[in-house]
Structure formats: structure tokens, C-alpha cells
Image: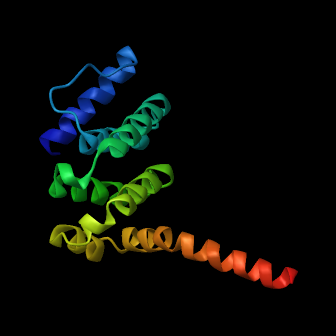
């Protein structure tokens, strides 16, 4: 177990006893993802919910401009834990879509997309949404006329 995982496990135990992990020195999205994974493994529902909210908040403020390595590490961690899917993956994909012009020029981001094909597919689907909507509108207009 890495030292980060040990810290996450300690915070899960604190949560069980005190219903709130104490403030910690080292807190970022990766740490909270580890806490979420441990909480999910041991079915600590209240901590799962708390961790999801915290991770979502951190993802919304996380941008690749603050550090591409950390950004891609967080994306990998989210896609590594399938149970973590859903809303957090949507937030992560939206963050990528919002910064795609900057990200696509980053070797680390392109490498991460090749290593995490689910992320690449989700991002492509998100990028195609406006195109799909225009296509649907045109089909509806043709069917009306």
C-alpha cells in the first residue's frame, strides 16, 4: 500500500469514528479518489457520497494549465476505477472538452488517451454532441417539410 493509500485508509477510519476525516496535509483529487475506492470497497456510504462531492469540486477547479502531469494522473485514476464512473467521468470529460485546444498539443495528454481508450471514446462522444444535435435538427426539419 502506498503512503497515499495509507493516509486515505486512515481518513476512512477517522470518518467511521468521527463522521468526518480530519483536515490533512496532503489533499488533492488523487487522494480523494483513493479514499473513495477504499470507502466503496468497505461500503462506507456516507464517505462515498462525501468523497464524490469533494472529487467533483476538485475536478471542476482542476485545469490542465495548473499542471498537465497531475491532470492526466487524475483522469487515469478516475478511469482506473470503473465504479467511479458516471458523474465524475462526465465532469472530467467536460474539463477536457473545455481545454481541448491546449490539451491536444500536450504529449502527456495524447499518451494518456492512447493508454485509456475509454477516456478517448468518452471525449470523442462529447465532442460530437453538437454535431449530432445539428444532424437531428436537420432530420426533424426534413421530416416536417
Outermost top residue: 18
Q: Which of 124 and 65 is in front in this view?
A: 65
Q: Residue furthest front?
A: 145
In depth, the one of 10 and 134 nearer the eye is 134
Question: As drawn, is 8 to the left or to the right of 87?
Answer: left
Position in image of residue 127 (x %, y %): 46, 70
Q: List x then y, in percent, for residue 21.
A: 31, 22
Which of the 4 image quadrants contains residue 19? top left
Q: Which residue is drawn at 37% across and 73% down?
A: 120
> In the displayed image of the protein, which residue is found farthest to the right?
144
From where the camera sits, is residue 117 visible?
A: yes
9 over 105 or under it: above or below: above
Residue at point 78%, 78% (across, down):
140
Quadrant of the image containing the C terminus: bottom right
Q: Where is residue 102 in the image (x, y as percent from the top left)?
A: 24, 65
Residue 1 in percent (x, y) is at: 17, 45
Q: Tell me which residue sits at (26%, 73%) in the image.
A: 115
Amino acid at each position: 500500500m502506498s503512503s497515499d493509500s495509507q493516509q486515505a485508509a486512515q481518513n476512512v477510519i477517522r470518518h467511521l469514528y468521527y463522521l468526518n476525516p480530519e483536515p490533512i496535509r496532503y489533499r488533492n483529487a488523487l487522494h480523494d479518489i483513493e479514499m473513495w475506492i477504499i470507502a466503496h470497497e468497505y461500503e462506507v456510504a456516507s464517505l462515498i457520497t462525501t468523497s464524490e462531492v469533494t472529487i467533483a469540486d476538485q475536478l471542476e477547479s482542476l485545469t490542465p494549465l495548473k499542471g498537465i502531469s497531475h491532470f492526466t494522473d487524475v483522469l487515469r485514476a478516475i478511469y482506473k476505477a470503473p465504479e467511479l464512473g458516471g458523474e465524475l467521468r462526465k465532469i472530467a470529460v467536460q474539463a477536457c472538452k473545455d481545454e481541448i485546444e491546449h490539451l491536444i498539443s500536450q504529449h502527456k495528454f495524447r499518451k494518456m488517451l492512447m493508454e485509456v481508450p475509454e477516456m478517448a471514446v468518452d471525449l470523442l462522444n462529447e465532442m460530437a454532441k453538437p454535431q449530432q444535435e445539428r444532424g437531428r435538427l436537420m432530420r426533424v426539419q426534413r421530416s416536417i417539410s
